[in-house]
Image (cartoon, coloured by chain):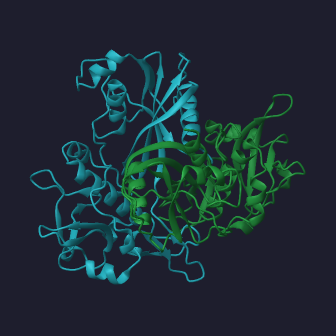
Chain colours: A cyan, B green
């Protein structure tokens, strides 16, 4: 089963980023520009990503090299996204419309969009050097920003935040929780950011103890997913526990409960008359629940 | 087998960070300050971390709450590190002395030090807001910095960079490479940063293809490790390949070769007369090779 956003839509062609001559050649009339409305994708009548030419970018836009694809004649083409100046400093959340559109997008388009959105958002929110406070400028086809102060010259790279998300099991039942921002009756896997000085297994144990007061053992990795809001790496795990009592951290969760296999299976059919509403198909939690049911 | 830096030396006590009153109580005469020399640890005669009192911190230092431990009477104590102003903006690499000291440090001390070093380094290099360029100030016990410009007020969080590191296998032989910065004859697992829009398995496949021209399949997760230089999360994987020919990316690697099980086993005894020098015990690559030999 495909995990949404993963898989890679384009050849990232890393060496191109450090090769200004090759990058210049790829910025030609064949190059494609991913059409975006702010950070949202512009979708065609078929629900797919729309691409234009580089001529559509504004004079003051920064161009980010997303990677290569090939045209109908198998001639390689540079694929780009634009960072318009009006996006600078913006912290726009995903539009409600986007969540609906993503459910219908093809896997390859979701993967291309995930990388583009994270990268454009990073450029928009990193106009200045965190080390010296001076303005930064785009470098290496958009995979770096460099401080413009020659005395600093710090190099900054796109950020990816690793997050653990975990199914915790006790005797065939799963611990799921709901965050205050969820739609009514939605429950999903607990999750949290990995901190400096933590391994994946450490972070799973800490998060479950913090949020639900449950001590886990036997943490195993299941699957991962890039999550472009703004740039997380979701690391999906499974853990066992012998604890039954749940002590909810009410600053993080509205509720947390044990659900039986039957309750999970019913919710995963998409039914809205069961014990809870399952997470949507593009969420890695959906994939984790599918995996758990199929074991 | 314990993985260096992982495991967690202290109770991170996340709720304390958002509770100024509790944090103030913990900043008392019982509190301990991790002694550091720049970003390096100060080690006692027994090779363990040295702790002092908060009175040792300078007037202009920022205090970072590392977590809780208990004194001999099981009374909880706040544990802190200091960010002195002279560290601001510094990008000091690990001292050569540190690499030797780490090989002798206890697992719990390595874990405590890993978190502290990453956090202190992050504060030193994030004095300014990447969104607006204004100065930032420490918040939430050192787990956040906030822009001092009220019109921006952006919140910044400690950065963790996920990295894939992988053993690639073909018919019982392993692909190992050497980076130009390695000591003579050292070979280790290939590795690279995970980029926005990539899952773990995507990144493994891309890195191995980029650095060695080898296409992998059947990527599985093995183990993870926090790596505090400055703040990576090493995600150790195993992959299979049917390719034999290696095409080295000479901008990344000096060399890459296939090594037999016997050659790996000999190197892992610490012998320096074999086909290569194994990575040191505190590196996750060492753990991956141990895991591979024990299968």
> Where's the C terminus of chain B, which quadrant?
top right
User: Residue B2's spot in the image, x, y percent?
Assistant: 66, 40
Tell me: B213 left or right of B158.
left
Front-most of residues B73 and A96: B73
Asked which quadrant contains residue B87, the reply is bottom right
Which residue occupies 73% across, 60% down?
B99
User: Residue A102's spot in the image, x, y percent?
Assistant: 23, 46
Tell me: B64 left or right of A191.
right
User: Residue B107's spot in the image, x, y percent?
Assistant: 73, 43
Front-most of residues A267 and B33: A267
Q: Which residue lies furthest to the right in this view?
A: B45
Q: How many labels does the image show?
A: 0
Q: In the figure, A149 relative to A33: above or below?
A: below
User: Residue A231's spot in the image, x, y percent?
Assistant: 41, 53
Tell me: A287 left or right of B134.
left
Tell me: B232 left or right of B119.
left
Which residue occupies 58% across, 48% down?
B289
Q: In the figure, A38 relative to B109: above or below?
A: below
> Where's the N terminus of chain B, which quadrant?
top right
Residue B199 visible in the picture: no
Front-most of residues B131 and A74: A74
Which residue occupies 49% across, 34% down?
A220
Residue B270 visible in the picture: yes
């Amino acid at each position: 089963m495909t995990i949404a956003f993963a898989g890679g839509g384009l050849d990232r062609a890393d060496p191109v980023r450090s090769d200004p001559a090759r990058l210049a050649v790829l910025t030609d009339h064949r190059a494609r520009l991913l059409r975006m409305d702010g950070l949202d994708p512009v979708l065609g009548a078929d629900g797919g990503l729309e691409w234009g030419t580089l001529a559509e970018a504004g004079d003051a836009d920064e161009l980010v090299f997303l990677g290569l694809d090939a045209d109908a004649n198998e001639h390689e083409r540079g694929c780009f996204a634009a960072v318009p100046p009006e996006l600078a400093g913006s912290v726009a959340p995903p539009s409600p419309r986007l969540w609906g559109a993503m459910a219908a997008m093809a896997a390859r388009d979701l993967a291309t969009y995930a990388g583009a959105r994270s990268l454009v958002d990073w450029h928009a929110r990193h106009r200045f050097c965190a080390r010296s406070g001076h303005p930064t400028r785009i470098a290496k086809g958009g995979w770096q920003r460099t401080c413009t102060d020659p005395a600093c010259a710090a190099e900054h790279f796109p950020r990816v935040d690793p997050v653990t998300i975990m199914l915790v099991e006790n005797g065939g039942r799963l611990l799921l929780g709901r965050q205050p921002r969820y739609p009514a009756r939605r429950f999903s896997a607990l999750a949290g950011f990995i901190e400096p000085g933590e391994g994946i297994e450490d972070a799973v144990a800490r998060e479950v103890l913090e949020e639900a007061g449950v001590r886990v053992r036997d943490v195993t990795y299941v699957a991962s997913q890039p999550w472009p809001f703004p740039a997380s790496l979701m690391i999906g795990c499974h853990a066992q526990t012998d604890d039954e009592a749940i002590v909810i951290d009410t600053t993080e969760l509205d509720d947390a409960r044990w659900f039986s296999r039957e309750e999970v299976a019913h919710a995963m059919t998409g039914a809205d008359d069961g014990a809870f509403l399952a997470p949507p198909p593009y969420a890695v939690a959906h994939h984790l629940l599918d995996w758990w049911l199929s074991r």
